[in-house]
Image (cartoon, helix red, strand yellow):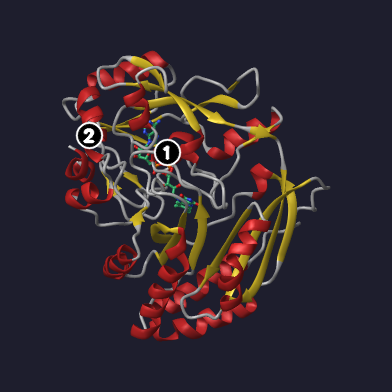
């Protein structure tokens, strides 16, 4: 038995074995020999997606390299590389990813498997960037799927939670390398909410963070720029250490949380930097939290955020972390929460050592009232019947899963309840 835990430590698993194959043949052999298999990327999912008592695969050492298409618009990329390794290597080839989320330790395949997204009025999730997949199926065969070759399997694979096979590479969109200018400023929440549409129209990426008990929001914009890089700070900022200390204080004395949040917001300093996109997209996230996130139709996004934060204030609930509000473009992926059109994404976080389960469950009801569907990697309590009600293509997805994995090799308890 081995031990495995996710980033937030809320999922503790005991796989029979963790294997790190280096060749395709070794990977195929492992898949054929095992009864139960899951693949883990960086373990950044909050849901028990990687949980297994069978074989847990780690693809970070698998052979393979980036292969750029002659038109330089797409590239095959190794599935087990972290986004950090991938985006740095793309930069050296004169390329960037069109968009990224908040952090970059995730494996490429891990990010694609759950619809990981950043923010941007017209930018889809990372899953929308993938146009072809190389997979090792449950019977050990290696296949390549795209819109022309086994199109049903490709459509299912576009957001598949690791249920259809082991991804070894994906052909993804790339852009000529670009730099970004990041600005982080404090603004009254009411003003940010009133002007968010205009802000999103004038910046390629815009989002804001707000503590439930604060009236000021932290507004972050990223915009492509051609300019000199700003110097990198000589010593790391101590903001995270202060945040950690205040979270600990709030956990011990929840009654102080509203005042602590006002102090933290008041103390937040403006930030400005320019640098390569791969370096500016991600932020540091060292204070551990648990997270849920709902994607709601864009027009209902700000109302949903307001409804949840009003509920927290009204009930004086101990929520120590800020909310994050982003936009993501619509898509046509069967299991994507953005497949009904442009969406707004509202993330609710809780400091990891503090209770979150009941708070999140109650907040889900509010998000659902606003037409929300959860991020698959973040805490949710959807039942199979709810999946069917929210996703008309769910059974079509299951049919592909049954076709390529009839014995349920890639299922675990959580996923079997929803997709067997
Ligand atoms: C600090 C932090 C910040 C985050 N920021 C964002 C954000 O900005 N935007 C956002 O949308 N999400 C965000 N997330 C969520 C995160 O992007 C997703 O959970 C993502 O799936 C994690 O990638 P991973 O490599 O850690 O995958 P894991 O959590 O390890 O796995 C996720 C899924 O991918 C599958 N998988 C992984 N590799 C393969 C493979 N080779 N073949 C088949 N299946 C595979 C796994 O089986 C599992 O089902 C964040 C999470 C954390 C902890």
Task: Respond yes or no on whether mark 2 lies under 8 Å from ligand 1.
Answer: no
Q: Check disc 1 and report its element: helix, strand or loop.
A: helix
Query: Which quadrant of the render holds ligand 1?
Result: top left
Using residue 335 as the reference point, say whether residue 124 is left or right of it.
right
Image spot of residue 5 (x, y percent): 34, 47
Q: Is residue 16 visible?
A: no
Image spot of residue 98 (x, y percent): 60, 40
Residue at (65, 73) in percent of width and height:
186
* Precedes in sequence: disc 1 or disc 2: 1
State the image quarter where residue 187 is shown: bottom right
Q: Which of 35 and 129 is in front in this view?
A: 129
- Mark nearest the camera among 1 and 2 is 2
Other-residue count near label 2 (Cα within 10 Å), few / some / many at <14 / 14–19 / ≥20: some
Other-residue count near label 1 (Cα within 10 Å), few / some / many at <14 / 14–19 / ≥20: many
Rounded to the nearest whole Å, what is the CA distance between mark 1 and mark 2? 20 Å
Using residue 153 as the reference point, say whether residue 97 is left or right of it.
right
Q: Is residue 418 visible?
A: yes
Image spot of residue 384 (x, y percent): 18, 48
Image spot of residue 79 (x, y percent): 46, 29
Task: Respond yes or no on whether mark 1 lies under 8 Å from ligand 1.
Answer: yes
Q: In this view, does 366 lie above or below 17?
A: below
Q: Residue 398 carries which label?
A: 2
The quarter in which the C terminus is drawn is top left
Residue at (39, 34) in percent of width and height:
158
The quarter in which the N terminus is drawn is top left
Q: In this view, does 176 lie above or below 219?
A: above
For label 1, the residue is 110
State the image quarter where residue 99 is shown: top right
Q: Check disc 2 and report its element: helix, strand or loop.
A: helix
State the image quarter where residue 182 is shown: bottom right
């Amino acid at each position: 038995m081995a031990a495995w835990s996710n980033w937030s430590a809320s999922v503790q698993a005991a796989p029979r074995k963790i294997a790190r194959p280096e060749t395709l043949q070794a990977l195929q052999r492992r898949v054929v020999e095992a009864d139960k298999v899951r693949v883990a990327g960086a373990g950044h999912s909050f849901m028990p997606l990687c949980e297994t008592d069978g074989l847990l695969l780690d693809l970070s050492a698998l052979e393979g390299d980036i292969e750029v298409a002659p038109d330089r618009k797409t590239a095959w990329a190794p599935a087990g590389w972290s986004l950090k390794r991938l985006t740095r290597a793309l930069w050296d080839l004169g390329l960037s990813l069109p968009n990224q989320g908040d952090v970059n330790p995730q494996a490429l395949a891990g990010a694609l498997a759950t619809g990981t997204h950043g923010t941007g009025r017209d930018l889809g999730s990372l899953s929308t960037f993938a146009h072809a997949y190389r997979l090792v199926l449950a019977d050990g065969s290696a296949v390549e799927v795209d819109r022309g070759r086994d199109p049903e399997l490709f459509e299912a694979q576009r957001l598949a939670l690791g249920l259809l096979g082991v991804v070894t590479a994906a052909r993804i969109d790339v852009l000529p390398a670009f730099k970004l200018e990041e600005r982080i400023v404090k603004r009254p929440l009411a003003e940010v909410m009133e002007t968010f549409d205009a802000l999103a129209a004038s910046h390629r990426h815009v989002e804001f963070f707000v503590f439930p008990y604060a009236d000021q929001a932290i507004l972050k914009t990223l915009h492509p720029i051609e300019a000199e890089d700003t110097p990198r700070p000589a010593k790391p900022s101590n903001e995270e250490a202060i945040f950690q200390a205040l979270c600990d204080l709030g956990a011990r004395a929840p009654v102080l949380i509203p005042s602590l949040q006002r102090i933290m917001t008041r103390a937040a300093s403006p930030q400005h930097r320019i640098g390569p996109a791969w370096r500016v997209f991600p932020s540091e996230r060292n204070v551990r939290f648990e997270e849920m996130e709902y994607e709601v139709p864009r027009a209902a996004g700000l109302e949903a955020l307001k409804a949840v934060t009003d509920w927290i204030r009204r009930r004086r609930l101990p929520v120590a972390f800020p909310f994050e509000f982003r936009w993501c473009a619509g898509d046509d992926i069967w299991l994507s929460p953005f497949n009904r059109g442009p969406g707004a994404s509202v993330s609710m976080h809780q400091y990891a050592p503090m209770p979150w389960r009941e708070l999140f469950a109650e907040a889900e009801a509010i998000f659902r009232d606003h037409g929300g569907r959860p991020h698959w990697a973040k805490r949710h309590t959807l039942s199979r019947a709810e999946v069917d009600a929210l996703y008309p293509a769910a059974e079509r997805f299951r049919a592909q899963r049954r076709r390529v994995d009839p014995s349920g090799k890639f299922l675990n308890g959580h996923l079997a309840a929803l997709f067997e």
